[in-house]
Image (cartoon, helix red, strand yellow):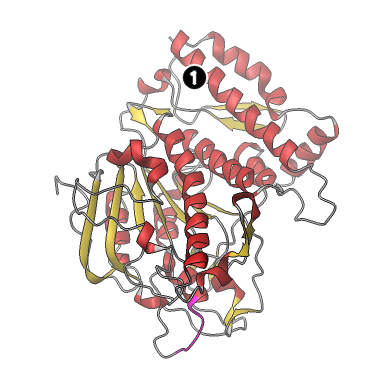
Amino acid sequence: MKTLNRRTLLRGLGVSIGLPMLDAMAATSSTQSPTRLAFVYVPNGINMAHWTPQAQGKAFEITRVLTPLKEHKDKLTLLTGLTHNGGRALGDGPGDHARAAASYLTGAHPRKTAGADIKNGTSVDQLAAMSVGKQNRLASLELGIEDGRQVGSCDSGYACAYSNNISWRSDSSPMPPEINPKNVFARLFGSAAAGETQEMIARRERNRRSILDFVLDDAKSLRADLGSTDQRKLDEYLYSIRDIEQRIEKATRQDLGFAQPEGTPADYAEHVRLMFDLMTAAFKTNSTRIATFMMAREGSARSYREIGVPDGHHPLTHHRNDPEMMEKVAKINCFHFSLFSEWVKKLATTEDGDGTLLDHSAIVYGSGISDGNRHLHHDLPVLVAGRMNGKITPGRHIVYAQDTPMTNFYLSLLTNFGVKAESIGDSNGELKGLSELA
């Protein structure tokens, strides 16, 4: 059987496609499968009555929002008691939504300004990317669903950059999320040569050709040297790439009768699923180990007619304890989580070395606000899916002391990721108890 380097690519005519972990690579690899780290953000808080379990430890119950992952309870870790003090006003008055997003991965209190003099902090994903990102084609991947301005004021005197970004390379440099699946696909599978990718994409689209057409000869040659198991893995992987490609083409050619951002799907659920599948492909091929995904920008007033909620999300969260409005918020929360759960289930069945992608990942899901009606930044909804290569013991609900900094959790994630950081935001030490072996 032919032995392959983990960085082997399929190449052809300006295209380079990474490969999933194959048995033929094990012979050349002396280390375990790499750890992946992802942060999935939902805006406007969550109806916490339908999120937080009453029981602690392994006996925790699956609440309404968490129901789609009931059968995968043993792969989940719920954390209660974590706080982002940087999201609070601290004398700056209104602007909780801007502060929620800005502080979510940084733990910083953003400077209140609507001008260009923004100041926040470096986010946990970028601390990881700056340390290990050079090992991969892409240091990190920042994804989103809603297009958001980067200039001007979006929330009570706070710059739009705060509301529309959770990833920050430095305290003045946000990493805007890419919302166009076509562009993400091109980054993952296009040439690294400057200018060549766009030319290749235009040529392929003119001729309605698949990206796989350009690497077909290389793929055939490689397949002939692989064992039967690796041949199956390669076939399944190439099929998944073509499936994503076809879905992007179909989803972005719908005639809505009104303008939409070029290349973005009209259907919200399909847009989200495509982004999750692109993250799967990125992790599977080791194109990157770090990703963030905003399922909507903070303060989003998107409506969800497809689930019977025509009202705007953000206005609904100011429900003043109205049962009907609270129920609509819960429906949105359940909808978001159901889409996330589809991704978790896919990761749990995606082979990766001696386990699955989920085994080797820490996938963090949550929001920078708990109760959207009162704009609370404590007892935040925090869920971690995966075992992080054995660094996390899942299947538990862990309750921490009130106002424990969320950034303590991030310090622990960085340590488990192999990145040493003295502090992040308002951290005062690592979070204990993520592993029963610690």
Residue 323 drawn above or below residue 389: below
**Residue annotated with mark 1:** 233
Q: Position of residue 293 (x, y in %)?
A: 52, 53
Decide whether residue 67 is among the magenta residues. Answer: no
Q: Which residues are magenta?
A: 92-96
Q: Name the outermost residue toward the front.
A: 323
Residue 88 shown left or right of residue 155 in the figure: left
Q: Position of residue 275 (x, y in %)?
A: 58, 45
Q: Position of residue 106 (x, y in %)?
A: 41, 68
Front residue of 337/362: it is 337
The kind of secondary structure the magenta stretch mainly shows is: loop
Q: Quadrant of the N terminus?
A: top left
Q: Name the outermost residue toward the left.
A: 437
Q: Position of residue 205 (x, y in %)?
A: 81, 35
Q: Residue at coordinates 63% horizontally, 36% vertically from top-left?
A: 189
Q: What's the residue type where badge 1 is placed?
A: Lys
Q: How many marks?
A: 1
Q: Residue at coordinates 48% horizontally, 72% vertically from top-left?
A: 322
Q: Residue at coordinates 53% horizontally, 36% vertically from top-left?
A: 281
Residue 313 drawn above or below residue 109: above
Q: Secondary structure at mark 1?
A: helix
Quadrant assignment, res 70: top left
Front residue of 427/380: it is 380
